[in-house]
Image: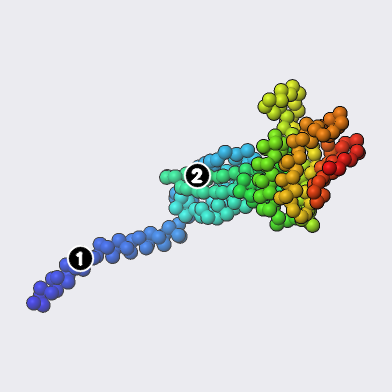
Amino acid sequence: MKSKNKKSLIKKILKTLPVVIGGVVIVYLGLLIKEVEIPTVLPIEEVAVAGSFSFLDRSKVESMVISNINGGYFTVDLNSIRESLIQLPWVKNVSLRRQWPANLEVIITEQTPVAYWNLDGYINDAGEVFKPEKIDNKLNLPKLNGPEGHHNNVWKFMNVLYQEMALLEFEVVRLDIDERRSWQMVVSEYKNVKGKNQESTDSEGVMNFIDVKLGRFETEKRLQRFVRILPSLAVGHGSANNALTNKNIKVIDMRYPNGFAVQLHDVQQAEA
């Protein structure tokens, strides 16, 4: 009986021996990999930066990735490279993946600016502020201004205004909220609107800026009143010789309880 038990035990040991040896080999190789200069054994030979860029310099991004590679194919710290890239103001998102045998692919989503924020930043398509070193003032974007930390409120109100003004064939080119939480915007009529057959145009495609004061209180109510009266002002209804038209209106002040005031470019003022 003892002989049979010994043989059975020996068989079990022989069966598990390869597994044990394999585990030891794996652990040893792992320790060896940590000690060996992996970049010289399995180096990253090529970095490919993918993405559609309007503001980022692809070659500079590639150089930045290469300078941050601190390991070989298996040991390169992808999180470290990602963290360095996500700090770039024009980078919205980054993902990295290895491609056998020696390549690294970097996929970057660039920021999409939809508005200016104050004098030193942009708002992206998610309503977030980002601030590059340089601001391109030639982009055809609305200008939003307000106290720091209030960009989300301004952006939300801008979306409401955009829908309202588009129905009137106007656009909001500027929206401000001051420290007292008082709102003011600048609107302009689209040029070459369908059906108007305008022959002349300029590089901006807009004309006749009108400053609109909405104030601090009952802003939504004042906005709706402005939406109602703007079409009649734009075509000169109710004024002698069409004096009140969008071409010579400078300011529309909606801060009156039940009416508004209009200031013309020649400093005349009318109240309704």
What amino acid is at disc 1? Leu
User: Could you tell me which residue is drawn at 55 percent across and 55 percent down?
Assistant: 80
Label 2 and label 1: CA atoms lie apart by 45 Å
Q: Residue at x 8, y 77 (%)?
A: 1
Secondary structure under badge 2? strand
Answer with left or right where residue 179 lies relative to residue 6. right
The answer to whether residue 107 is above or below residue 76 is above
Disc marking residue 272 = none
Q: Residues within 10 Å of mark 2 (few under 14, many from 20)?
A: some
Give how far across and how far down residue 241 sits, in percent.
86, 28
* Percent coordinates x, y for residue 221 in the rendering: 72, 50
List the residue tagged with mark 2. 105
Residue at the spot 81% in from the left edge and 42% down from the top edge: 252
Quarter of the view holding residue 57? top right
Provide residue 21's location: percent of width, then percent of height. Answer: 29, 63
Nearest to viewer (mark 2 / mark 1)? 2
Q: What secondary structure is marked by label 1? A: helix
Q: Amino acid at mark 2?
A: Glu
Could you tell me residue 168's position as x and y percent? 70, 36
Of callouts 2 and 1, the N-terminal one: 1
Residue nearest the viewer, comparing 58 with 211: 211
Above or below — where is 1 with respect to 94? below
Q: Residue most toward the right?
A: 267
Residue 20, above or below 245: below
Q: Nearer the viewer, residue 156 or 89?
A: 156
